[in-house]
Image (spheres, rainbow, N blue to C red):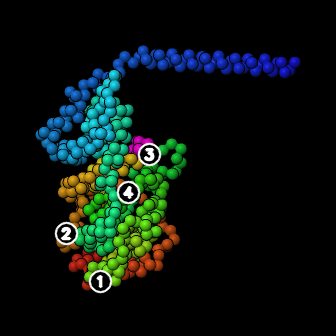
Amino acid sequence: MDAERLAMIGALVQQQNQNLLRLQQAVDRRRIERRRRDRVVWVRQWILRRPEHGLYDKLMVELRNEDPRAFQHFMRMPPAMFDEVVQRLTPRLTKQDTNYRASLEPGLKVAITLRHLASGNTYRNMQYAWRVPHNTISVVVREVVKAIIEEYTDEVLFCPTTEQGWRDLADQWYQRWNFPHTVGAIDGKHVACKAPSNSGSEFYNYKGFYSVILFAMVDADYKFTYIDVSGNGSSSDAQIYNESDLHRGLDQNRIHAFPQPDPLPNDNQDVPYFIIGDDAFSLRTYLMKPYSTRNLTHEERIFNYRLSRARRVVENAFGILANRFQILLTTMQHHHETVRTIVEACCILHNLMRTRYPVLQNRLVDRAQPDGNLQPGAWKEGRNLEDTIVVQGPNTDSRDGKRQRNLLKHWCNSLAGSVDWQERMVAIN
C-alpha cells in the first residue's frame, strides 16, 4: 500500500514538473514574439544618416583636406600612414553585405578603433558621433586590434635575428647614451582595467586598483623589441621577467645569434653583452642594474648615473606610448584579455610610428645635449603609466654579475670610458 502511494505521488510530481516546463516554454515563446513585434526597424534612422553626418564621412574628410595636422592629432597618425594601415588591413576587415544592412567599410573600422585608442572614450559615448551602435563598435575594436597584431607584428616588433643586428643595437646605445654593450632596457607598467569576475586579488595591485602589466624591452630609439602582456596586477617586474621567454633565452644562452663577449670601447678585456634594468631585477652577466643607493662611493655614483641615463629610454618609450594612446591612462572597461590585445596593438602602432615618422615624436622624448644635460620630454607634462612594485627580497645577484658590474664601473671612471660631463652631473644630482 505504501509503495502504491509513493508511486502515485511520484507520478503527480512528474506531471506537475512537465506542466511547469510547458508553461515556461509558452512564456518564452510569447516574450520572443513580443520582441519581434516591437522591433519595427532593423537600423535606427539616425544611424542610416551616417554618410551625411558621421565623423568618418564628414569631419575626417574636412581635416584631411584642410588641416592635416589636426587629422594627425585626431587619428594619432598622419593621413598617409592612416591610408597605409587601412590598405594593409582591408583584406582582414572586409565583410560581406547582408539583406538587412551593408557592412562597415574597413576605413571606418580603423578610424573608430584609432580614435578609441587615442581618446579612451567609451563605446556608448562614441556611438553618437560616429553613428555606429555601441555593440557594433565593441566588435569592431576587437576585430581591428587583432588585425593590426597579425599584420604588423613580424614587421615592426621583433628582436634581431643576426649577430650583427644585436651589435648594431649595442652601437646605437653607445652612440646615443654612452653606455657600452647594451642591447635593451627593460621595465614594466600597470594598465588599469575593471575587476575581472572571480579573479580575487590576482589583478589587484599594490597601488590599489586592478590592472594588467605591460613588461617590455626597448632599443635606443624608443622602439619596443620585446613585450609581454600576460602579467596580472599583483605580479612584480621580476616575477614577470623570470617567467618570460626573454629571461629563459638569456639565462640558458638560447637567444638566436646573441653576440659573443668582446672588449669594451678603447679596452682589451672581453665583456658579455647585456640588457639594463632597475633594482627590481637580479644582477647577472646578461643584466646590469645600479648599485644599492646606500653608502655609494664616488665611482659607484658615476656608474649609477651613466646606467640610469641609458635606462631612461624605456621610461620615455612608455611615456610616448601613453601620451599617444590615452586609453592606457583610463580604467579600461573591456574583458581583461581584450585589454591585453589592445595594449599589444598600441605597442605595435607606436613602433610603426617610430619607424615611419620618428621626427614627429621627438618633442615627446628626453633629448641629450652635448654638455650631458637632458632636456625633459613633453611626455612628463601629463599623466603617465604607474610603475610596477619593486620587490625587496634576498640578494640573488650572481658573483660573475657583480664582477662584471665592477669592471663596467672602472671603465666608466677611466680614460677609456669616461665622458666630460659625468663629474658635473653627479655633483648636481
Front one among 355 and 220: 355
Where, by quadrant of the figure, is residue 132 drawn? Answer: top left
Where, by quadrant of the figure, is residue 65 drawn? Answer: top left
Kindly identify the amino acid type of the residue bearing the numbered disc 4.
Ile
Which is in the foreground here, disc 1 or disc 2?
Answer: 1
Q: CA distance from mark 3 to mark 1?
A: 49 Å
297 lies above or below 2:
below
Give the left or right position of residue 181, taking residue 340 as reference. Answer: left
Which is in the foreground here, disc 2 or disc 3?
Answer: 3
* Mark 3 surroundings: few (<14), some (14-19) or many (≥20) residues within 10 A: many
Q: Residue at x 48, y 57 (%)?
A: 235
Q: Which residue is mark 4?
A: 227
Of the two numbered discs 1 and 4 on the same chain, state the one appearing first in sequence.
4
Q: Residue at x 71, y 20 (%)?
A: 14
Kindly identify the amino acid type of the residue bearing the numbered disc 1.
Asp
Q: CA distance from mark 1 to mark 2?
A: 26 Å
* Highlighted range, magenta: 332-339
